Image: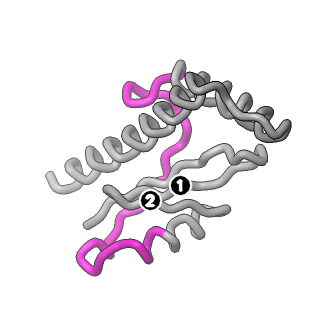
Amino acid sequence: MTAVTILPILSDRGGTEYRAIAGHHQSSGKTVGEALDALTHELTSEELGTLVVVQHQKPDPLFTAEQQERLKELMECWRTARDSDSSLSREEQTELDALVEAEVRAATDRATALADELRS
């Protein structure tokens, strides 16, 4: 069984999009269903038996409130820069990339922990 985690993500247009994650596979969509459908096309036949977990954006030890707040701040800066045909500083872009990666890693770890729990 493959555990799938679906996260609501603030889009660069200020709305909500969804990211579906299963192990090393990821997809996104405008709705939970769209993200899940896109992910399903990436899974192998062995991975198609899935358990779907929708993760709400509450802080936890894997991705803290401080990280969430900083990600939100950097995304706002990124949108402002994009709208003015500019870009983030190298340091801000590096920090933003690291936070996005940390968020994905946290979602993967949550899904893995849940899968391990279900196997027990």
Q: Which residues are magenta?
A: 39-65
Which of 58/105 is in front?
105
Q: Residue furthest bottom?
A: 45
Report the residue at 56% width, 60% height from top.
28
Magenta-drawn stretch contains 77:
no
Q: Position of residue 66 (x, y in %)?
A: 53, 19
Report the residue at 71% width, 34% height from top.
87
Q: How is the image coloured?
A: one colour
Report the residue at 59% width, 48% height from top.
8
Q: Would you say the residues marked 1 and 2 are in contact, meaning their CB atoms lie under 8 Å apart?
A: yes
| Mark number displayed over residue 26 | 2
Magenta-drawn stretch contains 50:
yes
Q: Is residue 117 above or below residue 35?
A: above
Residue type beneath disc 2 = Gln
Image quarter for residue 75?
top right
| Numbered disc total | 2
Q: Residues within 10 Å of mark 2 (few under 14, many from 20)?
A: many
Q: Residue furthest left?
A: 120
Q: Disc 1 designates what residue?
A: 19
Provide the secondary structure element on which disc 1 rests: strand
Q: Mark 1 or mark 2, which has the lower sequence index?
A: 1
Q: Position of residue 4 (x, y in %)?
A: 39, 59
Q: Position of residue 6 (x, y in %)?
A: 49, 54
Q: Is residue 41 above or below residue 30?
A: below
Q: Position of residue 73 (x, y in %)?
A: 67, 25
Side of 93 where 88 appears, left or right: right
Report the residue at 52% width, 73% height from top.
37
Q: Quadrant of the N terminus?
A: bottom left
Which of 7/94 is in front?
94
